[in-house]
Amino acid sequence: MNALVVYESMFGNTEAIARAVAEGLGIGFEVTVADVRAMPVVGDTDLLVVGAPAHAFGVGPYRTRVVATWHGMAKVRVREVGLREYLGCSPWLPQVRAAAFDTNLYKPSLPGSAARMADRRLRVLGCTMVAAAESFHLAGIKGPLVDGELDRARRWAGTLAGTMRPVLPL
């Protein structure tokens, strides 16, 4: 089976989680990890996993990435393509199973979730969600990841893999 892990990352934390997810899926899957800026084609993917940092309490639009760059927060130039744009131009994906994750501050009272917004968009695109949206936590806006989050991402990926059964034609 084929898995595609697509991520948006400004500080490297979401990319680290995406790579840990890919490791967790490695047994039983041929896994491709792709930066969202590459606009990867889903193609014959059996499982699509998408991840992004929480910007403006969700999957941030272009302007939130611009603001982060203006304030010197991002380590890279502004990214014109983020997860919002990628999912916004994705085709109908009725045969694809999917899951979504985000990285955000470890503050339970903080509203919003990029993962839940991505989950809703994937459902609109026809995907079958194999797990609830998942959040992985950061100690600060730029990181680092809270201790144990990479291991938790690998375990979460293992549960995703466990939900995959062949789809039989009707």
Image (tube, rainbow, N blue to C red):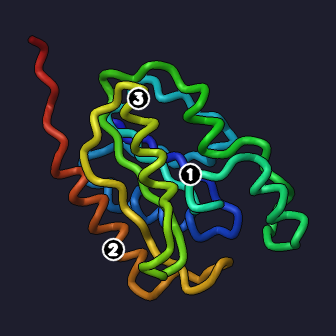
**Element under disc 3:** helix
Asked whether, in this view, residue 84 is left or right of residue 51, the answer is right
For image coordinates 48% across by 81% down, the residue present is 106
Q: Residue at x 48, y 29 (%)?
A: 42
Q: Which residue is mark 2?
A: 152
Cα–Cα span, label 3 and label 2: 28 Å
Residue 89 is labelled as none
Name the mark on residue 7: 1
Amino acid type for the residue under numbered disc 2: Arg
How would you rate the neighbour count of disc 1 (Cα within 10 Å): few for under 14, some for 14-19, many for 20 or more?
Answer: many
Query: Which residue carries the number 3 mark?
Result: 124
Side of 146 where 73 appears, left or right: right
* Label 3 vs 1, first from the N-terminus: 1
Residue 1 visible within the image: no
Q: Say which amino acid is labelled 3.
A: Val
- Marks 1/2: CA distance? 17 Å
Q: Residue at x 80, y 69 (%)?
A: 75
